[in-house]
Image (spheres, rainbow, N blue to C red):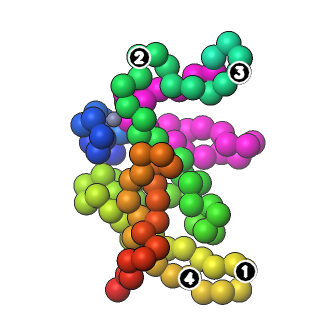
Amino acid sequence: MILGKCPYCGGDVIERKTVVRGKKAKLYTCENARKEYDDSEQFVFTSDSTCTFRIYSNALLRYNKRSIGSNEIKNLLNDGQIKVRLHGRSGSSEYFKYAITDKEYGISILWDEECD
Ligand SMILES: [Zn+2]
């Protein structure tokens, strides 16, 4: 399933199933950003990769957002940013922040921007 156009190279962004530390997750990746294990078991971009756009569905887990859905990625690719619902530590209430694509981390939160 194609979710949209890569913000960096214009390639198709697709959804893949993957496993992160033993847990099922989704990987949203540009068709031109492929990774594989090299001879020393390092997970690296393949030599024919021309892009680095990759977002794991659990990328915002540390802010207690369990999963980023494919619809959220679609909106992110369309609009350049999305509003995400985050949660504080246990017991505290939810809050909203804008998130944008980030070349190093895939996705990053705009902490200084207030959401309506
Ligand atoms: Zn790309």
Please name the residue shown 42% across and 77% down the image: 112
Kindly report the distance in space between the C-alpha atoms of the residues bearing marks 2 and 3: 18 Å
Please say if 47 is above or below 65: above
The quarter of the image holding the C terminus is: bottom left
What residue range appears in magenta?
A: 15-37
From the top left corner, tell me how far across and down residue 94 is, in percent.
56, 82
Instruction: Tell me where residue 48 appears, x and y as whole percent.
Output: 41, 16
Residue 71 visible at all: no
**Vertically, is 91 above or below 111?**
below
Q: Is residue 65 left or right of residue 51?
A: right
> Which callout, 3 or 1, points at the residue further toward the start of the chain?
3
* Amino acid on which disc 1 is placed: Ser
Answer whether residue 7 is magenta in the image.
no
Q: Nearer the viewer, mark 1 or mark 2?
A: 2
Per the image, the residue denoted by label 2 is 48
Query: In terms of depth relative to the viewer, which is nearer, 99 or 72?
Result: 99
The amino acid type of the residue labelled 4 equals Glu
Mark 1 / mark 2, whichever is N-terminal: 2
Q: Residue furthest top?
A: 39
Mark toward the start of the polypeptide (2 vs 3): 3
Q: CA distance from mark 4 to mark 1?
A: 10 Å
Residue at image position (29%, 45%) is 7
Q: Which residue is mark 4?
A: 94
Is 30 a magenta residue?
A: yes
Residue 41, which numbered label? 3
- Which mark is nearer the camera, 3 or 1? 3
**Tag 1 residue:** 90
Q: State which quadrant residue 83 falls in.
A: bottom left
Q: Is residue 2 left or right of residue 65?
A: left
Q: SS of the residue at dot 2?
A: loop
Task: Identify the amino acid type marked 2.
Answer: Asp
In the rendered structure, the answer to whether residue 83 lies left or right of residue 77 reads right
